[in-house]
Amino acid sequence: MMDKLKQLSAYIPSIGILLILCSLPFPYGNFQRYSLYAAGIGYLIDYGLNQRWREWRWSREKWVFIFFMAFYLCVPVWQLFDSSCTWLFYKKMETYLPFFVLGLFGFLGFNRTLKPEYVASVMVLTCLYVGGLLVYRMPDVSISAFPVWREALNETRIQTVNSHMVVNMYCNMTLVFVAWSLLESSWPRWWKVSLAVLSLGIVAGILVSEGRTGQLTVMPLIVAFLIAWLYKRSYLKWFPVVMVVLLAGFGLFWHYSPRYHDLSVQDNPRLYIWRVGHTIIEEKPIAGWGVSSAREEFIKRGNENEDFRLHYLLEYEYGAKERYGVVNPLIIHPHNAFMETAMEFGFIGLVIFLLCLVLPPLLLPIGVQRWYLAACVFAFAMQAMFECLGFCLLPIWLPLLSFIWRYNSQSDCPSALSDSRSGLGDTCAVRHTCADGRIE
């Protein structure tokens, strides 16, 4: 009875993680909060009941999780030297918390009850739910009037689900796990075909959105996954044909997409946003300003900058009043996670953040898994160049995906308990754990 209870407890944190993944396209709310609680409490139950501290060993991969925790700790430590303390500090403490919690859990260790295929299935079904919700909530607009239909679809998504940055990020991450399931898993053919068909709808959803970053991210991902598929199937002779078709398709999309028409560097608001941010970084390049002071200085200098006001602030204020009826100046941010990190924590914090991005694919997975984690980090980094952590880029993505790819049933041989009391056996010791969690 106790052995069954121990095995069952091993699955609770993985179920919590899957529930968290279901919640990420939507604004932070009770479902996401309770899913986080379930994952955290389930982890503690599993860790204590199965005595997982006995299997802990130092390895170089622990540095990844140490830097995750260090990045979170930048927020409270820098606050000690910040003369200002606004609600932004408390918001960062909450939204950056996954770096510390998942960093701690990753450092202490985890079991092998989570498969990338489970993640793919849950995320694809979530995307399917989002698509069905949009169809249900869409106003009566004919698709024959495509520009009007597209605008109505995107507005419905904003009102019903979330911004294009959040949803497109979710879709791109989903495609990475779908690629794993199609190329690496041994799941039934009918389910692979179903995932492939549904992934076409996910790609279409990204392309009809107004999110240029998401679109520019999915294109190289598609190319990389098709190359991997051709190589795995020994169809590399078709590579030139596939590339010609893809390039022609991307070119047509670029030509006919309204988001890429009449682009001008001089009219791009981020140019003026980043200029203001750069001047702030130059004054305190080593240690930065702190969370609250950096944002207050950014808003102050932005208001004093004519170009900033003309190309960014006026448009933001108009859109905020029209959509929300109120303008919160602290929402104004530099639209670049790297720049914001440098503003807040200086060169020290920026180096820690860059290590959080670079180290996971270098140190965590073994073999082919490294490339899939690298694809996830690429998607995260692309969004980070144009959005800030905690706004339209959820900080949880980076530590969560690193955690998932490191601790799954396909990972390298774990140093689990060889003790007969272990909830999941040791694949390196006498007992053997099957992929489904059974002990042989």
Image: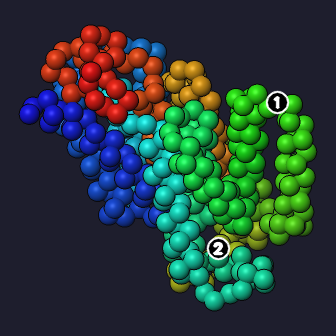
Rendered location of residue 144, percent (x, y): 78, 83
Q: Residue 222: in sight, yes or no?
A: yes
Give the residue pinned by disc 2. Answer: 154
Please count the marks in the image.
Answer: 2
Could you tell me which residue is drawn at 76 percent across and 71 percent down?
310
Relative to 296, say whether 193 is above or below: above
Between circles 1 and 2, the one closer to the viewer is 1
Is 69 displayed left or right of 231 in the figure?
A: left
Determine which quarter of the picture holds residue 183. Answer: top right
Question: Which quadrant holds the C terminus?
Answer: top left
Query: Of helix, strand and loop, which one carries label 2?
Result: helix
Give the residue pinned by disc 1. Answer: 236
- Residue situated in front as seen by the camera: 92 or 162: 162
Could you tell me which residue is drawn at 86 percent across and 36 percent down?
238
Query: Of helix, strand and loop, which one carries label 1?
Result: helix
Rendered location of residue 300, percent (x, y): 61, 62
